Every structure is written in C-alpha cells, then in structure tokens.
Amino acid sequence: MRGETHTTTGATTWGDDTTKEVGIIKINGGHAVDFDSTNYPGEPGDLVAVVNVTATAQDVTIAPAPFGDATADTVSCGAGDTVTVLYSEDNGWFFFSVAAAG
C-alpha cells in the first residue's frame, strides 16, 4: 500500500485527482471515487483502501470493469465501511475486499 492519504472534496479519480502515491482515500462528502484502469493504471500490486467517513453510502467505481467487461463495476460503500482495490497488470483495478464498520 502506498503511503499518502487523500481526503476527498468532490468526485475523485485515483491518479488524476490524487497522486499515484495515495494508498488511503477518505470519502468526505456525497460523491464517488473512481479507479480508471485505462487512463490511470497503477503498478502491479498497488493496493488502495477507500474509507467512507460520511453518514451515507457512497459509490466506489472501477472502469472498465476487470476481467473483460466493458461496463463499470460499482460497490456501494456504507457509512464507516472500507473498500480495498488492487491493481493487476493483467486485469487492471479490481475489488479486493469490503470491510463493514463496527
């Protein structure tokens, strides 16, 4: 996992609105966090934790979806939940784990 933490102020794309050194993203407001395998790929093995610090669910999206699907994949990250996203050289970004708060 990379060393930097980024707290969102609006819709965020890893590697575009953040540096590629961000390993933790805190969702702070009503907006999505996106991972774009085509335009903002990571390095193989990059792991990014997205933590929702708001009171309502927020989306974490991967586009294009890994494993050959051209549509986006979305996880609704509940209040206090964490979604971990991993980068694979062969498949791009994919959801690695989801941890519920509490």
Image (cartoon, grey):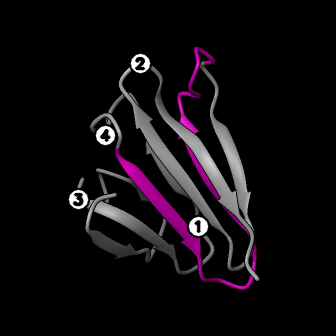
Q: Is residue 62 left or right of residue 88?
A: right
Residue that numbered label 2 is attached to: 90
Tell me if I can see residue 42 in this picture.
yes
Residue that numbered label 1 is attached to: 31
Asked which quadrant contains residue 57, the reply is bottom right
Q: Is residue 34 left or right of residue 53?
A: left
Q: Earlier in the sequence, mark 3 or mark 1?
A: 3
Q: Is residue 39 left or right of residue 30?
A: left
Bounds of the magenta span? Answer: 46-69
Mark 1–mark 4 distance (CA, rounded to whole Å): 22 Å
Q: Residue at x 75, y 78 (%)?
A: 56
Kind of residue at disc 1: His
Q: Residue 2's x, y, as percent?
A: 28, 60
Number of marks present in the image shown? 4
Residue 21: numbered disc:
3
Please say whether residue 72 is one of the residues in the magenta stretch. no
